[in-house]
Image (cartoon, rainbow, N blue to C red):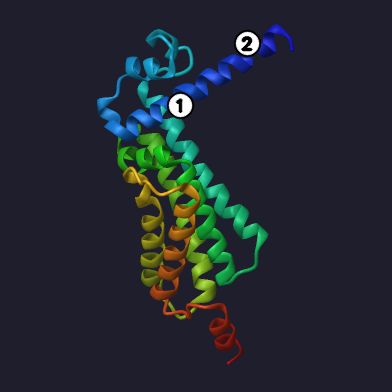
Amino acid sequence: MTATKQKSSKGADRREKILSSAAELMAERGYPSVSMTQIGAAAGIVGSGVYRHFDSKSTILVALLDRVVKRMLSGTRDAVAAGEPGLELIDAMIRTQTEIAIQNRSLVAVYLRDAGNLPAENLRDLRRQQRQLIEEWIFQCEAVAPYAGESELRTVVQAVLALINSVCTYDNPLPAELLVERLSRMASTTVRTGLDLPHDAAAAATEREG
């Protein structure tokens, strides 16, 4: 590896360390209560070193929230691309969203609490991506419940996403694998209850045939 590549790799590693440290601190204390000096200390970098990678605390927040919402959106799109419209696809979307949330608990916690601290332009972009995510979920729910109105569909989707994301707002002691399994089941039940759908595949198949 050349000296340039080594330097580039080291810089990327430091940037990731800054982001992960910032996410943990902001999730624990809230964005307004965290300073660049504290972020640098948590990342093992002197305060001035943080500015080599980020101009300000707000640019760190932008990077964190852009990352988490893009992961949610791409995860949903990947699940949709791999399946066919129906309850199995919605269950796959739920599983994917749950795994992303559990794997990125600190990011999701900051996303839920501190998005309002983004600069106006970045907040508009975040809201645009949020709308894209929600509209994809609504579209897939409508495919299994065409009788449901938009308000009903939107209510169910918001409830499901809130259920999944809420576990990131406190220190949950359950193992990640068990948490993903339990949350996925609860969220799947929420969809079926909210849209008045059968709760098991056999009943769903019978209803479709009828």
Q: Which quadrant of the view contains residue 155?
A: bottom left
Residue drawn 44% across the image and 60% down it:
182
Q: Position of residue 190 (x, y in %)?
A: 40, 68
Where the C terminus falls, by quadrant? Answer: bottom right
The image shows a total of numbered marks equal to 2
Please tell me which of labels 2 and 1 falls first in the chain: 2
Residue that lies at the very extreme toward the bottom in this rendered image: 210
Q: In the image, is residue 162 above or below residue 61?
A: below
From the image, tell me which residue sits under label 2: 7
Residue drawn 37% across the image and 58% down it:
163
The secondary element bearing badge 2 is classed as helix
Q: Position of residue 87 (x, y in %)?
A: 55, 71
Q: In the image, is residue 193 above or below residue 140?
A: below
Residue drawn 33% across the image and 14% down it:
37
130 and 85: which is toward the camera: 85
Instruction: Identify residue type, mark 1.
Output: Leu
From the image, tell me which residue sits under label 1: 19
8 and 103: which is toward the camera: 103
Residue that lies at the very extreme toward the right in this rendered image: 1
Mark 2 closeness class: few <14, some 14–19, many ≥20 residues within 10 Å: few
CB-based contact (under 8 Å), mark 2 and mark 1 = no
Q: In the image, is residue 65 above or below residue 36?
A: below
37 and 56: which is toward the camera: 37
Q: Position of residue 172 (x, y in %)?
A: 35, 46
Where the N terminus falls, by quadrant? Answer: top right
Residue 166, labelled with which disc?
none
Q: In the image, is residue 27 above or below residue 54?
A: below
The secondary element bearing badge 1 is classed as helix
Instruction: Identify residue type, mark 2.
Output: Lys
